[in-house]
Amino acid sequence: MKTLRQVCVFDLETSSHSVGLVNYLGQNRMESAIDLFTGETNPDKLRIDDTDYIFVNIEYQDTIYVVYIDVEYKDNGSDIETILYRFFSDDYRLYFEKQYSCWQNYRNNCIAFRDGRGITYTIWKYTDC
């Protein structure tokens, strides 16, 4: 994993406040961050307290932008954003353990991650709970 300057995590509603993300969307002919979730790919998933949150990530100008959707508004964003920030940080292995890739291991406080490619998810257990 290369070292990046910054990790920025946004919910879908506040993602338009990021100049860098808006510039990326414009350069890729997207009108809003919701366009990152459309198409043929399935987004990655985060499970907290038995609720799934979908998210996507993009790299643009040495920054990782992570956008998530909380359709049920169950979380105030702090837990989601902390976990996603830590997952995309250079020291993510301090907070996550790789699990065997089967859905039985996708329990509470886990991330199912494909990085936008392929059909197989890698399961990462968040250990700082």
Image (cartoon, grey):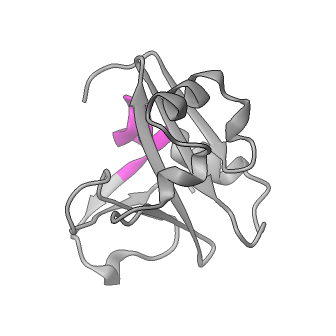
Number of marks present in the image shown:
0
Residue at horizontal 46 percent and vertical 55 percent from the top: 127
Outermost residue, front side: 29
Residue at horizontal 22 percent and vertical 71 percent from the top: 101
Q: Nearer the viewer, residue 88 or 70?
A: 70
Q: Position of residue 13 (x, y in %)?
A: 74, 49
35 relative to 70 in the view: left or right? left
Residue 34 in the image: above or below residue 58 = below
Residue 14 in the image: above or below residue 70 = above
25 relative to 116 in the view: left or right? right
Residue 17 in the image: above or below residue 11 = above
Residue 88 in the magenta stretch? The answer is yes
**Split into 4 quadrants, where in the image is the C terminus?**
bottom right
In the rendered image, is residue 95 in sight?
yes
Q: Position of residue 91 (x, y in %)?
A: 38, 31
Q: Position of residue 41 (x, y in %)?
A: 34, 63
Residue at horizontal 62 percent and vertical 44 percent from the top: 32
In the rendered image, is residue 128 in sight?
no
**Split into 4 quadrants, where in the image is the N terminus?**
top left
Q: Which residues are magenta?
A: 86-96
Q: Nearer the viewer, residue 19 or 108?
A: 19
Residue at horizontal 20 percent and vertical 61 percent from the top: 118
Q: Position of residue 96 (x, y in %)?
A: 39, 50
117 relative to 49 in the view: left or right? left
Residue 129 in the magenta stretch? The answer is no
